Amino acid sequence: MSAPGKTPRRPGTEAVARKGWFAAHRWLLLRRVCQLAILALFLAGPWFGVWIVKGNLTSSLTFDVLPLTDPYVFLQILAAGFLPAATACIGALIVLAFYLIVGGRVFCAWVCPVNMITDTAAWCRRRLDIKANHPPSSMTRYWFLAGTFVLAFVSGALAWEWLNPVAIAHRGLIFGMGAGVYFLVAVFIYDLLLTQRGWCGHLCPMGALYSLLGKFALLRVAAPKRAACNDCMDCFAVCPEPQIIRPALKRVGQDSPVIFDSLCTTCGRCIDVCGQKVFRFTHRFDSGSSS
């Protein structure tokens, strides 16, 4: 904690002063609008009888025409020994193609409902100046991912989906939370008190899978004006995967200012909080990015 009476410096303070509050929160606000709009599409049917989208993030049908299937659940079904229906296969291929193009972990920042919980925990950590941090190995999420497939194979069922916070949050918001709320509270407490960005940054198997899809994605964040960086560290403070910034910003192991790491969630917060306007959205082949 900070010393009594001392208020921790808030990331983005300089950006607000230089760009204004809305410009310093533009991508955060757009993400929230996107997340809530997607949720509203799913809620419109059960709540108001307007069936634009039927189902949930696991499997859905839009306008009774477009099937969408979560690739992670699809792979668990295969591991459990079942052959999904043709529409599920088509839906998984559509979602897979989309995230291969835009970036797998775009799901984490722009779609996943748990992101709002973990972002809130991160915000509270900064406000309370909580320093305790006990992160597991960076490979834990991938071992966890493999473990969920083994669990599906051994049990012959989608056992992990009963505990998956992402599935619990989305089903709960649509159909009622029930006991699943305790898992979401546990994620919040873990992120708040034990590990900074603990769930999304170290444990979530869905995030692990989507990061694998994002290795060759086109959409990227770059630091083309990195020479203007004043080392305020605000981008590191708000980034859910801060270790990915240094190679592009500080020329550690690469000359390009483009963030190539597939763990990038493309959330845009580094763009928001940078008062020097160092970062911007681009694509992986942007040869115009310069320092």
Image (cartoon, rainbow, N blue to C red):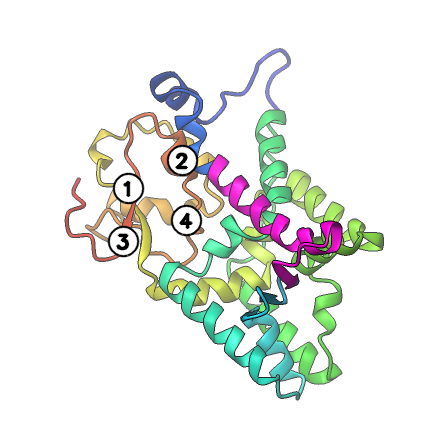
> Where does the C terminus fall, quadrant-wise?
top left
Which callout, 4 or 1, points at the residue further toward the start of the chain?
1
Disc 4 secondary structure class: loop
Whole-percent x, y for residue 191 in the image: 64, 43
- Disc assigned to residue 283: 3
- At 30% from the left and 40% from the top, the residue drawn is 280
Q: Examine the rendering and report whether any part of residue 113 can be seen.
A: no
The reply to whether the C-beta atoms of the residues labelled 3 and 4 are less than 8 Å apart is no
Q: Is residue 71 magenta?
A: no
Q: Secondary structure at mark 1?
A: helix
Q: Quadrant of residue 149?
A: bottom right
Chain-order first, disc 2 or disc 1: 2
Q: Which residue is mark 4?
A: 266
First of labels 3, 4 by sequence position: 4
Residue beneath disc 2: 235
Among the 4 quarters of the image, the one containing residue 116:
top right
The quadrant of the picture occupied by the N terminus is top right
Instruction: Find out whether the residues at labels 1 and 3 contact each other: C-beta distance under 8 Å.
Output: no
Q: Secondary structure at mark 2?
A: helix
Up/down of 85 relative to 215, above or below? below
Looking at the image, tell me whether mark 2 or mark 3 is earlier in sequence order: 2
- As drawn, the residue found furthest toward the right would be 179
